[in-house]
Image: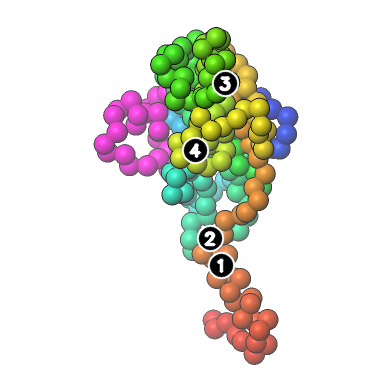
């Protein structure tokens, strides 16, 4: 496992590791996946587990990884633990032989994508990721395609939309988030992050709000013990 220096900005932790047979309390059961995909998944979830320890979480049994309807992973306190401490946002990526995880402080969303720096994207895939002037640029400078691809993947993840966000519609010259791309060893890494405008609430938060509202409406309202 290796710590990668994060870009300047909010608190962030980036860890990488070679794909291998890891075990994690956060791994999902994906029986239909290939063995290669399972190993990638387990390595990514193991990195998440180790990253949370380095972040300062000592009892991980109170945490779980949930997914949005767009399948974006996020952390949540397990219902019934009544934990309300802010949780970092997370993003995981993997390529041929490596996996990375990125954690960012509460109040931000993050997306990370990695690819082997020597990977070549076929020209017949350009029109699936770009259009207009950007597409023409890629046809003239195909060596820029990999960087464009990782940037757009990172943005899709930071927006928590994945492929529900059409990469052809992402204008890299007009962004409402931060975006950094760099090379580390043999990996090309893109990281995107933005402030969160809405904070999701778990059922316990909603219950506390409801009780407080009733207490304000009716001074005689009491909670039974």
Residue corresponding to mark 2: 202
For image coordinates 26% across by 36% down, the residue present is: 32
| Mark in front: 2 vs 3 | 3
The secondary structure type at the circle numbered 4 is loop
Residue corresponding to mark 1: 206
Q: How many marks?
A: 4
Callout 3 crowding tier (Cα within 10 Å): few <14, some 14–19, many ≥20: some
How far apart are the alpha carbons under marks 3 and 1?
Answer: 45 Å
How far apart are the alpha carbons under marks 1 and 4?
Answer: 30 Å
For image coordinates 64% across by 47% down, the residue present is: 196
Residue corresponding to mark 3: 134
The secondary structure type at the circle numbered 2 is loop
Residue 165, numbered circle: 4
Q: Nearer the viewer, residue 115 or 166?
A: 166
Q: Is residue 120 above or below residue 62?
A: above
Q: Quadrant of residue 110?
A: top right
Location of residue 211 in the rendering, given as x and y in whole percent from the top left corner? 59, 76
Callout 2 crowding tier (Cα within 10 Å): few <14, some 14–19, many ≥20: few
């Amino acid at each position: 496992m290796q710590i990668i220096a994060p870009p300047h900005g909010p608190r962030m932790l980036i860890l990488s590791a070679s794909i291998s047979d890891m075990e994690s309390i956060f791994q999902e059961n994906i029986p239909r996946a290939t063995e290669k995909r399972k190993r990638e998944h387990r390595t990514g979830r193991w990195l998440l587990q180790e990253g949370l320890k380095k972040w300062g979480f000592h009892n991980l049994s109170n945490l779980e990884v949930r997914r949005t309807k767009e399948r974006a992973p996020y952390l949540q306190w397990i219902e019934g633990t009544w934990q309300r401490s802010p949780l970092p946002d997370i993003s995981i990526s993997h390529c041929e032989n490596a996996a990375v995880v990125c954690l960012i402080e509460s109040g931000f969303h993050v997306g990370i994508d990695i690819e082997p720096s020597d990977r070549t994207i076929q020209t017949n895939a350009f029109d699936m990721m770009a259009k207009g002037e950007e597409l023409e640029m890629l046809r003239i400078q195909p060596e820029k395609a990999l960087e464009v691809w990782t940037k757009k993947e990172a943005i899709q993840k930071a927006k928590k939309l994945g492929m529900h966000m059409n990469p052809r519609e992402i204008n890299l010259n007009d962004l409402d988030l931060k975006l950094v791309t760099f090379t580390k060893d043999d990996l090309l890494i893109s990281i995107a992050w933005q402030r969160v405008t809405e904070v999701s609430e778990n059922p316990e938060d909603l219950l506390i709000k409801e009780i407080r509202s009733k207490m304000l409406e009716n001074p005689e309202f009491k909670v039974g013990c």
